[in-house]
Image: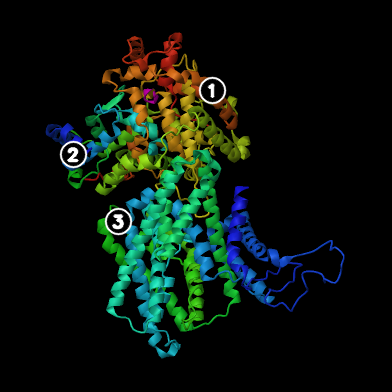
């Protein structure tokens, strides 16, 4: 795997990915070998089946949604660039990045982008709103069989009520950000990628 | 039946050494008052006088069954005690089981003492080490979460080996220093004996601590280190014990001896592991051929692990390490080779034997406490307690400082506190103390001190550790009880992160780990695992699993039927949702919701899934629920014509998976879903499947998806049957409302449907993708179920 990785991933590509995502060279190579090991078809792209072969994702309540997050709209395959682009959301925010607030292009792992990722886990139809049903779906996924639907409905209602400011009975992205303003999202949604 | 036979066999085996010696205890059971056979002159005769020539109608021969009978009664009594504890659930939450067992033992001991009976002298060295210890070790080794363990191996070994050494030597030295003080009157204990005693009491026992850690959801790093440490320091303690025992005889200790001691330590430890590995591999290899003798499959596991233990004992190397390593090695391969039932049987029996042994040991601890003669020495014992506590705390502190830089997730002070406070002593210490040879002058004192420290730690530390940990936790976590939003969204984030970590395979970055895995896949698996695993067809297995899960859910929710709303009411609620005025939520509602969520939300994927509680089998209900939902949604999507008129959401396309492949990939992983297997295992396990699909070209990926309905359509009917059955099994909510629900979410994404149609009509790229005859029935049927496969049924069961 190691030798394949280095031959198939050209230096220019690594540089481009580095610029786009902020990963280091060794991180990129390591993640590439992981990508290759998942890629059973050996055609340089991953399909949903490849992801679903990971057993832990199968028993993760949000497994399917996580997988879906990797695939851009309507696509069924994701190449390494796309893979890295998605993973870049979870790079820890470094201190020197925290200082630049509004640079030309916001880094992929900014707080807003992390929250957008989380938001998109709920919002399947991409209408930029979490409706009650979308919320219920996710809640139901995360909860055992002992909660009745009525109770879950109440919880969903309450959630929307807390967040909703413009009265449309749905949570928009801005409302989502507002509700989580006290939460340490940078820490919660970061993986310490290994070198 | 198998298990009863096992127990009886076990008891018989135990009784064998007692064939000739007369130390058999008397239990004060009603009706039988025959004294031990060593006093033949007392008591009534078993048989009536031989003078009578008549045929005795009713005879009684107690001595014949005496030994197995009494063993069985003891085991039963201890087990009844366990049942008794769980009747009142609140007790077990606050008081660890070991406390309760000791208490019951104390009570029984008190009874026996008052009627001047002797306690059962079953705790001879042989019986303990040959019969009672192996099941406990096998239990610990078999249910150890290997993945988490190997990740933290360095830390675990560090704490286990170095920590135990630190503790032993520290305590031993300090006690020796104390002994020098004349006031305590223990000057005759020399250094070796002190070290020996210190080695005995430095072994930490996991029983109470781990159940508390589990309940309080302490972070998994701490958990696995505590667990691993307990496991391995048993081995270290036994080694040290033997070493110091040997040394205690010698009047003078020379540096050569110390060096030899260290060398011996390595021989013992590594030798034990080597034997364990050897037997593990042999066992795995054997199970490759047992497909025709399923009934005795579990036997091999037990025999081989026990053999590993005995052979290690033969060579006086660490038998604990041997059996634990054997169990770890075996489990991985054996669980793939044996049938599902054998797998279950093995787990059950291991848990049972381990439970029995442990119960008996604590029980006897209680009994022995009351009935033996104690030698009490205030100074010695108090200082023992003090030093044990002190050195453990110091040890954890110092060791953590050293090892923290090497860890990916360092331990903070709270973790360290938990680790040091959780150092309870238990079974091993007791057994080792009890089996001290008689040439140790102050044997009674040591026994008393050991019992004292065990009882102190188990009762006081065991009961107080839970509130303390919760106290610390409360200060640590930011329980912002104001919004439900935060709770829900944070949970979503945590699940996501757990999933992503798995996806990235974060743990597999160690070079050696990767190498081992490759070696494993290429060489070991080929040798040790059967090739054909089609013991039952996919559908039959699926059916069985679904039925099992459905039945289990039925068991748990029968009480809640009344609370589930009827479908009609839910429909109406949905219709009226838009016009419903905003509900007001009071504070009580809010805290109810928080409670509800915190109790019912799935825990984040724990890597220590395999080990939930020392006294119960692993709980995989959460996994099963999740998998059931996925299968249900797969099934629903397969039902032909189910979603004819529903618009297709573009974003839900991601569930379009060829069913055959999907299901296949889930079954074996479900069995092994205790989540301590590397993903490469499942990836490598399906080499055959890949060839079916060849190399899908990029552009045709979409075509493949809807076309590949193949044989699954024929299976659909049987699958439907399954869904009906499990639909009945889950009485709460039939899947009927599902389509309605999903129609609300589905944005009409015709573009995707159009694409799929186009591809469906285009010539297939390879024979396997040819549309089935049923395909033209309705393109939308084909497209829809796969595309429309509802993600989760929000009203699932």
Callout 3: chain: B
User: What is the distance, in whole Å, between disc 3 and disc 1 at their CAs?
Assistant: 52 Å
Q: Are marks 2 and 1 on the same chain?
A: no
Viewer-side residue, B87 vs B572: B87
Q: Is residue A45 left or right of residue B84?
A: left
Callout 1: chain: B
Q: Which circle's residue, 3 or 1, is located before the other in the chain?
A: 3
Badge 2: few (under 14), some or many (20 or more) residues near its Cα, within 10 Å?
some
Viewer-side residue, B431 vs B94: B431
Q: In the rendering, at what x and y percent does residue B652 appear?
A: 39, 24
User: What is the distance, in whole Å, between disc 2 and disc 3 at their CAs?
Assistant: 25 Å
- Helix, strand or loop: magenta stretch: helix
Q: Are marks 3 and 1 on the same chain?
A: yes
The residue carrying mark 2 is: A22
The part of the image, by quadrant, that contains residue B413 is bottom left
Q: In the rendering, at what x and y percent does residue B363 appear?
A: 58, 66
Q: Quadrant of the N terminus of chain A?
A: top left
| Dot 3: element | loop
What is the span of residues highlighted in magenta in the rendered image?
B653-657
The residue carrying mark 1 is: B718
| Dot 1: element | helix
On screen, residue B178 above or below B24: below
On screen, residue A172 above or below B150: above
| Dot 2: element | loop
């Amino acid at each position: 795997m190691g030798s394949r990785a280095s031959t198939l991933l050209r230096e220019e590509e690594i540089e481009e990915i580095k610029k786009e995502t902020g990963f280091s060279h060794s991180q990129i190579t390591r993640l590439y070998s992981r990508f290759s090991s998942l890629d059973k078809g050996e055609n340089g792209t991953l399909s949903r089946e490849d992801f679903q072969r990971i057993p832990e994702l199968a028993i993760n309540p949000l497994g399917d949604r996580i997988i879906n997050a990797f695939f851009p709209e309507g696509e069924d395959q994701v190449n390494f660039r796309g893979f890295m682009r998605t993973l870049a959301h979870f790079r820890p925010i470094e201190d020197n990045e925290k200082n630049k607030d509004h640079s030309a292009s916001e880094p992929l792992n900014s707080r807003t982008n992390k929250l957008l990722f989380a938001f998109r886990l709920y919002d399947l139809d991409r209408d930029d709103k979490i409706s009650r049903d979308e919320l219920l779906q996710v809640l139901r996924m995360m909860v055992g069989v002992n909660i009745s639907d009525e109770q879950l409905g109440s919880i969903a209602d309450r959630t929307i009520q807390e967040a909703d400011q413009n009265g449309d009975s749905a949570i928009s992205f801005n409302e989502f950000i507002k509700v989580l303003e006290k939460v340490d999202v940078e820490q919660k949604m970061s993986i310490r990628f290994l070198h | 039946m198998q298990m009863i036979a096992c127990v009886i066999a076990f008891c018989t085996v135990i009784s064998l050494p007692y064939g000739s010696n007369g130390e058999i205890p008397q239990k004060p059971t009603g009706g039988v008052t025959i004294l031990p056979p060593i006093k033949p002159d007392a008591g009534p005769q078993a048989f009536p006088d031989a003078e009578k020539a008549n045929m005795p109608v009713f005879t009684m021969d107690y001595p014949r069954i005496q030994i197995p009978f009494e063993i069985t009664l003891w085991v039963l009594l201890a087990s009844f005690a366990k049942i008794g504890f769980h009747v009142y659930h609140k007790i077990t939450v606050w008081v660890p089981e070991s406390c309760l067992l000791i208490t019951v033992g104390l009570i029984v001991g008190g009874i026996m003492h008052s009627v001047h009976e002797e306690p059962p002298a079953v705790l001879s060295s042989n019986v303990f080490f040959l019969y009672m210890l192996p099941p406990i070790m096998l239990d610990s080794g078999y249910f150890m979460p290997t993945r988490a363990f190997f990740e933290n191996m360095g830390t675990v070994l560090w704490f286990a080996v170095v920590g135990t050494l630190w503790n032993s030597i520290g305590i031993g030295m300090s006690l020796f220093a104390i002994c020098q003080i004349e006031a305590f009157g223990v000057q005759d204990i020399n250094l070796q004996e002190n070290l020996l005693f210190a080695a005995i009491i430095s072994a930490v026992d996991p029983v109470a601590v781990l159940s508390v850690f589990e309940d309080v959801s302490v972070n998994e790093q701490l958990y696995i280190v505590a667990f691993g440490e307990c496991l391995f320091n048993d081995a270290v303690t036994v080694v040290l014990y033997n070493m110091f025992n040997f040394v205690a005889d010698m009047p003078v200790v020379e540096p050569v001896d110390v060096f030899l001691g260290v060398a011996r330590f390595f021989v013992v430890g590594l030798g034990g592991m080597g034997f364990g590995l050897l037997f593990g591999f042999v066992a795995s290899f054997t199970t490759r051929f047992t497909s025709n003798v399923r009934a005795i499959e579990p036997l091999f596991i037990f025999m081989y692990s026990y053999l590993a233990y005995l052979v290690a004992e033969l060579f006086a190397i660490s038998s604990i390490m041997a059996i634990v390593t054997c169990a770890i090695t075996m489990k991985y391969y054996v669980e793939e080779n044996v049938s599902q039932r054998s797998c279950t049987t093995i787990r059950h029996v291991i848990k049972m034997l381990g439970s029995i042994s442990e119960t008996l040991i604590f029980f006897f601890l209680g009994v022995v406490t009351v009935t033996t003669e104690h030698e009490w020495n205030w100074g010695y014992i108090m200082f023992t307690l003090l030093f044990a506590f002190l050195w453990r705390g110091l040890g954890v502190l110092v060791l953590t400082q050293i090892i923290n830089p090497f860890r990916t997730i360092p331990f903070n002070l709270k973790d360290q506190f938990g680790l040091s406070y959780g150092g309870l002593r238990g079974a091993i210490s007791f057994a080792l103390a009890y089996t001290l040879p008689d040439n140790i002058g102050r044997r009674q004192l040591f026994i008393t001190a050991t019992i004292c420290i065990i009882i102190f730690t188990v009762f006081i530390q065991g009961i107080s550790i839970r509130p303390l940990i919760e106290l610390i936790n409360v200060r640590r976590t930011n329980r912002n009880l104001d919004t439900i939003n935060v709770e829900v969204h944070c949970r979503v984030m945590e699940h996501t992160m757990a999933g992503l970590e798995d996806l990235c395979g974060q743990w597999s970055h160690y070079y050696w780990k990767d190498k081992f895995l490759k070696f494993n896949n290429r060489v070991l698996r080929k040798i040790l695992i059967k090739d054909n695993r089609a013991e039952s067809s996919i559908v039959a297995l699926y059916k069985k699993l679904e039925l099992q899960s459905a039945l289990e859910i039925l068991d748990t929710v029968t009480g809640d039927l009344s609370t589930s709303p009827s479908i009609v009411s839910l429909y109406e609620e949905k219709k009226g949702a838009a016009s419903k005025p905003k509900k007001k939520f009071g504070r009580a509602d809010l805290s109810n919701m928080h409670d509800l969520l915190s109790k019912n939300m799935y825990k984040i994927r724990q890597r220590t899934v395999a080990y939930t509680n020392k006294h119960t089998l692993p709980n995989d209900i959460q996994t099963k629920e999740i998998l059931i939902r996925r299968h249900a949604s797969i099934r629903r999507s397969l039902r032909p014509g189910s979603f004819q008129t529903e618009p297709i959401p573009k974003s839900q396309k991601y569930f379009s998976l060829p069913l055959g492949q999907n299901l296949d990939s889930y079954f074996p992983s479900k069995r092994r879903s205790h989540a301590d297997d590397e993903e490469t295992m499942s990836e490598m396990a399906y080499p055959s499947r890949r060839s079916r699909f060849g190399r899908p070209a990029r552009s045709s990926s979409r075509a493949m998806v809807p076309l590949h309905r193949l044989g699954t359509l024929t299976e659909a009917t049987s699958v439907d049957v399954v869904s009906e059955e499990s639909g009945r099994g889950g009485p709460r909510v039939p899947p009927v409302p599902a389509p309605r629900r999903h129609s609300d979410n589905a944005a009409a994404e015709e573009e995707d449907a159009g694409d799929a149609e186009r591809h469906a009509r285009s010539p297939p790229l390879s024979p396997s993708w040819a549309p089935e005859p049923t395909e033209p029935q309705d393109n939308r049927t084909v497209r829809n179920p796969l595309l429309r496969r509802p993600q989760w049924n929000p009203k699932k069961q």
